Image (cartoon, rainbow, N blue to C red):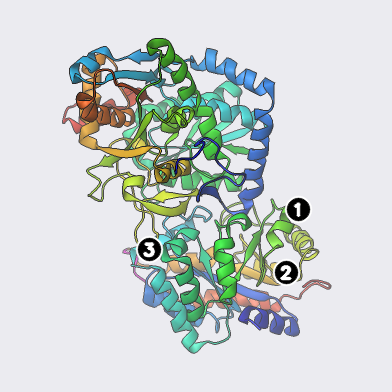
């Protein structure tokens, strides 16, 4: 049976159906409650919204354009393809949307230091940026493996005054960075705000990050109405933790005629042991503050994820996505490293846009499906980030030297 | 009377506090870990916390994080952890064992199956660090029904209102985390610990154990003088790490060194005089 609305979650304890919640150590519980209280107060404060709107406009550069990808549409010969150009935001990705919202909350709570975890470095750069803008100390936790494959972003964070803390435990990627960020937070509860980089973590983070990211979908609604006079037929976004997908999808969830495709990273293939597709290849568990789907072995040990894109290289996904999956509202599909690489190159050559490897996974799904869709089918891709940071990874994958 | 109740009652009669030791099950390998576990009561442990290894122990510092990875690398899993408890129980009927760890391995094992197998093996209590009161009902109710206590944690960030939430449903004892931080980090002062223990005791009759940042017999002794139990974890686990060769294998003297160190710590607790009015 269809629900009246898919947009009413979470409940007051932060659950989306069975998922979400607050699974953190007792030391953090009062703090997590404080964050929720402060967030609800901020939402009710017109001055908070006013400052957020102002910064969205003049600092991030919103609204981001909705762009008709004409040559790609012609090349694929089917559905009419639009890009929501989040890669044009200040710092080059959608991550700034929730970073700016959270830093305003941190200020409001009187915190003097922010911390963040990062995979591709986009959320780390966004956090370092807003920390610089508001004069807060900033430490970013980043897996040693990711530091190696995302050097430009590491240098950016340092230029912005952040301390980049290499994480060597576990698989030395995003999940381990999140472990160390949680360890730092529990040690520095008195002055530190944790700016989480996706729609995961303990309540209220999945809700709060979603709310800040939903500006993507709200703008898209207005822009597509202006361009086409109707809503799109489908929405496509890549999904790791799931912040950009949730931001695009959420304002459309109750529009039954809008289909949604979230594209997970299939790495070498979802039937191999090297992928990052938590919905396709994971099952319910508890990690990093929430109950969600996780890549894990039969003993409940977390399995290292793999994706060519550091930003999708995480063995979990936001709890609201799992709920939407189980409700059947959003379709969770996947694209391999190779498909993403091809999409990356095609986008460069047909549209003159270098997309992030993350966003290239969404594009790969469009390349697969658009040719067989009618020409009046309108699809919007969330072009969540720019790919300048990925050129070394892509060059290595293509066997070229820069 | 449960083993935990009996232990605290017997120690109260002796006029001293409990010494609680933590090791990670299967660290550095199943056989050595079992040997240590079996030797702990003779080395002075009154209660044993046995860590259930997890890949992502986000509330632990490096010592226990590394211990978990050593154990997992050597093939540890929940079945083996429970079989260690069973083997221990075969030779020891009195020392309480509290399993400590994270929720996901318990959840993956299946909650009903877990509480049944754990009770059967002789487990007395559970400390699940990422399962706060708001989320613990699905484990706590079946565990309590099977005769297993779910130990609640209080911390320096717990105000009186939060303590009420924490204590509602608590059993066995209350574990006071002495510092805001991860295991094996900073130490709290005895004055701060005493104030916190007094505050908790104003709201409950349960015994209060104190852990985090206790490394030496002296520290253990001074904590024991103001609380019902002193918990040492990382320092013991580090002794295990020091007894490994370059390839991570246990050296010949490792188990003895760990138990000798434990004995020193226990002496600190045993010679501590409980303060008047305490405990």
A4 to A71, vertically: above or below: below
In which quadrant of the rendered image does the N terminus of chain B lie? Answer: bottom right
Contact? badges 1 and 3 (CB < 8 Å): no
Instruction: Please tell me which of labels 1 and 2 falls first in the chain.
Output: 1
**Quick one: SS at disc 2?**
loop
Q: Residue furthest left?
A: A399
Disc 3 designates what residue? A299
Q: Main secondary structure of the magenta part?
A: loop
What range is drawn magenta here? B247-251
Disc 1 designates what residue? B161
Instruction: Give the number of the mark in front: 1 or 2.
Output: 1
Disc 2 designates what residue? B227
10 Å neighbourhood of mark 1: few (<14), some, or many (≥20)?
Answer: few
A202 to B206, vertically: above or below: above
A49 to B142, vertically: above or below: above
Q: Which mark is residue A293?
A: none
**Quick one: SS at disc 3?**
loop
Q: Is residue B250 magenta?
A: yes
**Quick one: SS at disc 1?**
helix
Front one among A375 and B244:
A375
In which quadrant of the rendered image does the C terminus of chain B lie? Answer: bottom right
């Amino acid at each position: 049976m269809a629900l009246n609305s898919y947009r009413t979650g979470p409940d007051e304890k932060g659950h989306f159906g069975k998922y979400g919640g607050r699974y953190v150590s007792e030391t953090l519980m009062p703090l997590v409650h404080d964050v929720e209280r402060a967030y609800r107060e901020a939402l009710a404060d017109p001055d908070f919204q006013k400052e957020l709107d102002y910064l969205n406009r003049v600092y991030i550069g919103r609204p981001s354009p909705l762009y008709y990808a004409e040559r790609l549409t012609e090349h694929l010969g089917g559905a009419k393809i639009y890009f929501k150009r989040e890669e044009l935001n200040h710092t080059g990705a959608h991550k700034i949307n929730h970073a700016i919202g959270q830093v305003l909350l941190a200020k409001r709570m009187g915190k003097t230091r922010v911390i963040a975890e990062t995979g591709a470095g986009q959320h780390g750069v966004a956090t370092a940026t807003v920390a610089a803008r508001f004069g807060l100390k900033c430490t970013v936790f980043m897996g040693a493996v990711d530091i190696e494959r995302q050097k430009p972003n590491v240098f950016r964070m340092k230029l912005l005054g952040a301390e980049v803390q290499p994480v060597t435990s576990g698989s030395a990627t995003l999940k381990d960075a999140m472990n160390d960020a949680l360890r730092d937070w529990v040690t520095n509860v008195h002055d530190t705000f944790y700016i989480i980089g996706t729609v995961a973590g303990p309540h209220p983070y999945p809700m709060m990050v979603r709310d800040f990211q939903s500006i993507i979908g709200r703008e898209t609604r207005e822009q597509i109405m202006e361009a086409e006079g109707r809503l799109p037929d489908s929405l496509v976004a890549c999904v790791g933790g799931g912040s950009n997908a949730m931001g695009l999808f959420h304002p459309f969830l109750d529009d039954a005629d809008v289909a949604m495709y979230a594209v997970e990273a299939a790495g070498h293939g979802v039937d191999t042991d090297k992928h990052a597709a938590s919905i396709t290849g994971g099952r319910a568990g508890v990690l990093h503050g929430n109950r969600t789907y996780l890549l894990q072995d039969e003993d409940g040990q977390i399995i290292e994820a793999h994706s060519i894109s550091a930003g999708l290289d995480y063995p979990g996904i936001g709890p609201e996505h799992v709920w939407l999956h189980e409700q059947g509202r959003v379709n969770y599909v996947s694209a391999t490293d190779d498909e993403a690489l091809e999409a990356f190159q095609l986008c460069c050559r047909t549209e003159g846009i270098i997309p992030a490897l993350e966003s290239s996974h969404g594009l790969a799904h469009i390349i697969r499906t658009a040719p067989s869709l009618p020409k009046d089918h309108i699809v919007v891709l969330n072009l969540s980030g720019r790919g300048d940071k990925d050129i070394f990874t892509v060059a290595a994958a293509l066997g070229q030297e820069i | 009377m449960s083993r935990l109740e009996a232990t605290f009652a017997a120690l109260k009669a002796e006029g001293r506090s409990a010494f609680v030791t933590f090791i990670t099950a299967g660290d550095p390998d199943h056989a050595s870990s079992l040997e240590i576990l079996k030797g702990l009561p003779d080395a002075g442990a009154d209660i044993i916390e046995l860590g259930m290894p997890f890949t992502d122990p986000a509330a632990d510092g490096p010592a226990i994080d590394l211990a978990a990875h050593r154990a997992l690398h050597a093939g540890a899993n929940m079945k083996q952890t429970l079989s260690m408890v069973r083997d221990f129980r075969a030779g020891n009927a009195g020392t309480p064992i509290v399993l400590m760890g994270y929720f996901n391995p318990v959840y993956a094992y299946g909650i009903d199956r877990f509480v049944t197998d754990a009770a059967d093996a002789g487990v007395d209590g559970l400390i699940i660090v990422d399962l706060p009161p708001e989320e613990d009902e699905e484990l706590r109710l079946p565990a309590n029904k099977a005769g297993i206590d779910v130990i609640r944690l209080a911390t320096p960030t717990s105000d009186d209102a939060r303590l009420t939430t924490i204590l509602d449903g608590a059993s066995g004892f209350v574990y006071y985390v002495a510092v805001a931080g991860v295991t094996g980090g900073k130490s709290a002062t005895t004055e701060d610990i005493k104030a916190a223990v007094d505050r908790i005791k104003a709201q409950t009759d349960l015994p209060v154990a104190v852990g985090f940042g206790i490394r030496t017999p002296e520290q253990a002794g001074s904590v024991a003088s103001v609380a019902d139990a002193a918990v040492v974890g990382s320092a013991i686990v580090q002794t295990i790490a020091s007894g490994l060769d370059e390839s991570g294998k246990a050296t010949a003297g490792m188990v003895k060194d760990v138990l000798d160190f434990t004995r020193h710590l226990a002496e600190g607790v045993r010679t501590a005089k409980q303060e008047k009015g305490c405990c």
